[in-house]
Amino acid sequence: MNTIRHTIILVDDNLSNLAQGKDILKPYYKVFPAPSAAKLFEALDNIIPDLILLDIEMPDMSGFEVIKKLKADPAYKDIPVIFLTSKRDEDSELRGFDLGAMDFVVKPFSAPKLLKRIENQLLIIQSKAALRNYAENLENMVREKTEEVIDLQNAVLETVADLVEFRDKLTGGHVTRTQLYMKALLEELIRMNIYLETVSKWDMDHLLPSAQLHDVGKIAITDDILNKPARLTPDEFEVMKTHVDEGILAIKKIMSNAHESAFLYHALLIAGTHHEKWDGSGYPEGLKGESIPLEGRLMAIADVYDALISERPYKKALKHEEACRIIEESSGTHFDPTLVEVFRKVEADFSNISQKVQ
């Protein structure tokens, strides 16, 4: 027998059966006899047993009624029940199993059979608990490993973004600010229940970190253009525009060489489409309206706002109010009108972010 002394409540209105059952069980288990259903529920106020042995034929409340009540109560529904019965009819057994009984023991008791039935049920319970613990531990391990992978992937994104920003000496803090602007827009988008069908499919663990790579292609632009302390000529601007294509190529190259590249999916869309315009006049593809991925339309607002409020050698920084006016006036031309309405709701957040991240 198992050396662990499990707790059993034995319920039988026949005192002789109750005494006999207690004598059989007490060398191996902690036994609490209950002569009625009422006494069982009184005992359950203080004891949660490992198993209940339950007589079916009792005068005030039958075993069938008792098990119904047990299974309806979240505190007791998982306690296994073995029915005790003098009946040997199939209908009673089927009814008992339907109600959730684990087994039947026929009275008068055969001590070896009763002990073996109990032992088998407790072993099943222990096996289920062990499997449940194993599954929970495995789930925790998978979750921890997943979090480690996500942290590593996001660290790669951040490191690459830092390298780009290190080269582009004119846009300090731009990557961090635009990521925070995106976060403000996204949270308001969800709160307003806008574009939820699209947003619900996004991998939120990677979306915002991916925003850091929107200008990754600038790493391929020469210093004399990237850091020119004056306004670019038309030809130089055409070269600067190639940072989008260079960014797409860089991300696709990483994706082709990486075993797990799904985390770069949002980065590819953001880098490749944040210079597209709602009216189709943007670059590099001239996409129009909702053919521009939502990620790119969001970043377009974040990117332009930050450019407007930032000082450059060839221009002064605009005030927050002026930047907001320009974005709102560009609704339907440069920007998605729906997202401009979202932007209106979080203008103050944009201002706070721009002041905190210099």
Image (spheres, rainbow, N blue to C red):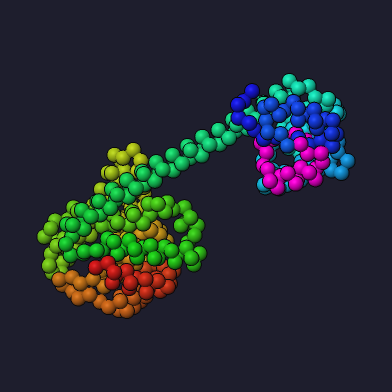
Position of 313 relative to 39 (above/below): below
Query: The C terminus lies in which quarter of the figure?
Result: bottom left
Q: Give percent across and percent down for residue 57.
A: 86, 36
Position of 144 relative to 30 (above/below): below
Nearer to us in this view, 81 or 311? 81
Q: Could you tell me how many numbered marks the image carries? A: 0
Answer yes or no: is residue 81 visible.
no
Q: Is residue 59 left or right of residue 183?
A: right
List the single residue furthest toward the right: 59
Looking at the image, which residue is at 69% across and 26% down?
27
Q: Is residue 86 left or right of residue 213?
A: right
Nearer to us in this view, 23 or 104? 23
Q: Give percent across and percent down for residue 121.
A: 67, 29
Q: Is residue 264 left or right of residue 247?
A: right
Q: Give percent across and percent down for residue 180.
A: 34, 63
Position of 57 relative to 245 (above/below): above
**Quarter of the image holding residue 257?**
top left
Query: The N terminus lies in which quarter of the figure?
Result: top right
**Quarter of the image holding residue 96?**
top right
**Quarter of the image holding residue 131?**
top right
Nearer to us in this view, 5 or 160? 5
Looking at the image, which residue is at 36% across and 63% down?
182
Looking at the image, which residue is at 43% across and 63% down?
187
Q: Magenta span has 297? A: no
Residue range of the region highlighted in magenta in the rendering: 33-54
Nearer to us in this view, 247 or 88? 88
Looking at the image, which residue is at 28% across and 44% down?
254
Q: Magenta span has 53? A: yes
Q: Give percent across and percent down for residue 3.
A: 60, 26
